Amino acid sequence: MFISNAFAAPSVPGGDLLSGILPMVIIFILFYFMLIRPQLKQAKQQKAMIDALKAGDEVATSGGIIGKVTKVSDSFVSIEIAADTVVNVQKHTVQTLLPPGTIKAI
């Protein structure tokens, strides 16, 4: 009789379902506004910049190549990196659109 009383677990009232789910919902909302939304905004700006590329723009690629755009096609961009030296890169590798005159200043 004493042993069964000692091992008997006290009854714990069931927790409210809302109190268990609410912290997870709040964390997901914070995660969305602090990480996902800014990343989507940045990707949208990057796509708009790539779509607006035209001949004469000065760009930097993700590989570190800096040059002037000479030709833009559907998937590739031709970049002049030196006199009579043109390289073809995929559009998505263009990382930054540089201000005009940057190449001459380097």
Image (tube, grey):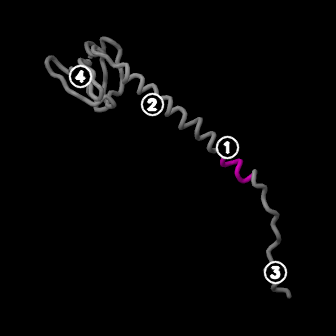
Gap in angstroms between the C-alphas marked 2 and 1: 25 Å
User: Which amino acid, by three-letter code, is at mark 1?
Assistant: Ile
For the residues labelled 4 and 1, say whether their Cβ atoms are less than 8 Å apart: no
Q: Which residues are magenta?
A: 19-24
Dot label at residue 86: none
Residue 55 shown left or right of residue 82 in the figure: right
Compare marks 3 and 1 and give the one earlier in the sequence: 3
Is residue 90 covered in magenta? Answer: no
User: Pointer 2: what residue?
Assistant: 43
Furthest-front residue in this view: 74
Compare marks 3 and 2 and give the one earlier in the sequence: 3
Callout 3: SS: helix
User: Which amino acid, by three-letter code, is at mark 3?
Assistant: Ala
User: Pointer 1: what residue?
Assistant: 26
User: Pointer 4: what residue?
Assistant: 79
Look at 50% across and 33% down and name the residue there: 40
- Is 51 located above or below residue 15 in the figure? above
User: Pointer 3: what residue?
Assistant: 6
Point out residue 76 in the picture as x, y percentages from the top left corner. Answer: 27, 28
Packing grade of label 4 (10 A; few <14, some 14-19, many >=20) is: many
For the residues labelled 3 and 1, say whether their Cβ atoms are less than 8 Å apart: no
Gap in angstroms between the C-alphas marked 2 and 4: 22 Å
Front residue (pair 6, 53) = 53
Point out residue 58 in the picture as x, y percentages from the top left corner. Answer: 30, 17
User: Which amino acid, by three-letter code, is at mark 2?
Assistant: Ala
Front residue (pair 65, 73) = 73
Furthest-left residue in this view: 84
Task: Give the label, 3 or 1, closer to the camera.
Answer: 1
